[in-house]
Image (tube, rainbow, N blue to C red):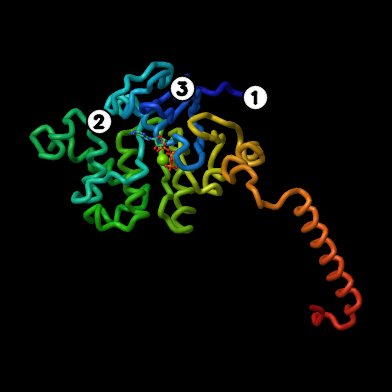
Amino acid sequence: MTTQPTPVLEARGVTMRFGGLTAVRSVDFTVNAGEIVGLIGPNGAGKTTFFNCLTGLYVPTEGTVSYKGTVLPPKPHLVTQAGIARTFQNIRLFANMTVLENVLVGRHTRTKEGLWSALLRGPGFKKAERHSEERAMELLEFIGLAHKRDHLARNLPYGEQRKLEIARAMASEPRLLLLDEPTAGMNPQETRATEELVFAIRDKGMAVLLIEHDMRFVFNLSDRVAVLVQGEKLVEGTSDVVQADERVIAAYLGEPFEGAPGEAEAAEVEAAEVEAAEAAADATSTTSSTKGEAK
Ligand SMILES: Nc1ncnc2c1ncn2[C@@H]1O[C@H](COP(=O)(O)OP(=O)(O)OP(=O)(O)O)[C@@H](O)[C@H]1O
Ligand SMILES: [Mg+2]
């Protein structure tokens, strides 16, 4: 039985121009409920600009962004309120606040009290405080930072700051989470853990759209991958389809350049390799009586 996908986010004909530069050109893009979608592309392809258009940070020059069928007003706080949260390529935490406080700030769109009340601990805040704190601690448990609740954000190692950003974004209780290079600056172990974390986030019922340069990470995770090149969506499909697409390979590696091995050279190398393999096989068979000594 196949069920129809339910679109959470729909971008239609999104174009973003900065003066003479078209950073994003006529992009149509959909994220469905329950999906993890990857957005890849070379540096300067327009990925972050596209995120900024989706989240109301930029007003697209042309096109619309809809959330669950309703066109979103291009205002960040209204986008967050609607149910979309994001992290930033350049981490944006309150460096001198604690880990817990950073998550609490992320909750302010979901509490009646608002940001200033949360920060100044006004009378309305006291009532909501316990519930908010419980919820924030749940998120810190989930993300693996509960033991650092009272540490200042600026004292966390880089990988943990990235995780804290994710927790803060999740605190607004989004249905769609946008992650801009969540593993940038992480070591391989942290990247692996982040992969598990993104799967766990999806399992909580959130759709995830992620920008990444770590190809293994993005292809492992994503149900679908879209490739942006010079502002245009070049290819979109499953990981297998996108990985095998020659246009994607060319976009990343560049067109063959002068002096690069041509077909003739490539064939020569291949032939030499075959010859070497045969020679090695011969050597092994003639020295099979002195097993282990063949080199
Ligand atoms: N506010 C801006 N004003 C003018 N030009 C901008 C602005 N923001 C981005 N650009 C330009 O738009 C293009 C796309 O940049 P963007 O940051 O979206 O790329 P990206 O795909 O996120 O790259 P990276 O992988 O390096 O993060 C670049 O040429 C960039 O210089
Ligand atoms: Mg970027």
Residue at (28% x, 40% y) in the render: 135
Query: Is 192 on the left or on the right of 172, as rendered?
Result: right
Residue 109: give its label.
2
Counting from the top left corner in percent of width and height, residue 202 is at 46, 38
Query: Is 136 on the left or on the right of 51, as rendered?
Result: left
Quarter placement of the C terminus? bottom right
Q: Earlier in the sequence, mark 1 or mark 2?
A: 1
Residue at (40% x, 25% y) in the render: 16
Does the CB distance between marks 3 and 2 fall below 8 Å? no
Q: CA distance from mark 3 to mark 2?
A: 23 Å
Give the foreground label among 1 and 2. 2
Query: Is 144 on the left or on the right of 6, as rendered?
Result: left
**Residue 249, image quadrant:** top right
**Secondary structure category for the residue under label 1:** loop
Residue type of the residue flagged with mark 1: Met
- Residue named by callout 1: 1
In the rendered view, tell whether residue 118 sits above or below residue 20: below
Residue 152: give its label.
none
In the rendered view, tell whether residue 135 sits above or below residue 144: above
Residue type of the residue flagged with mark 3: Glu
- Residue named by callout 3: 10
In the rendered view, tell whether residue 295 sits above or below residue 36: below
Front one among 4 and 46 = 46
Residue at (36% x, 52% y) in the render: 144
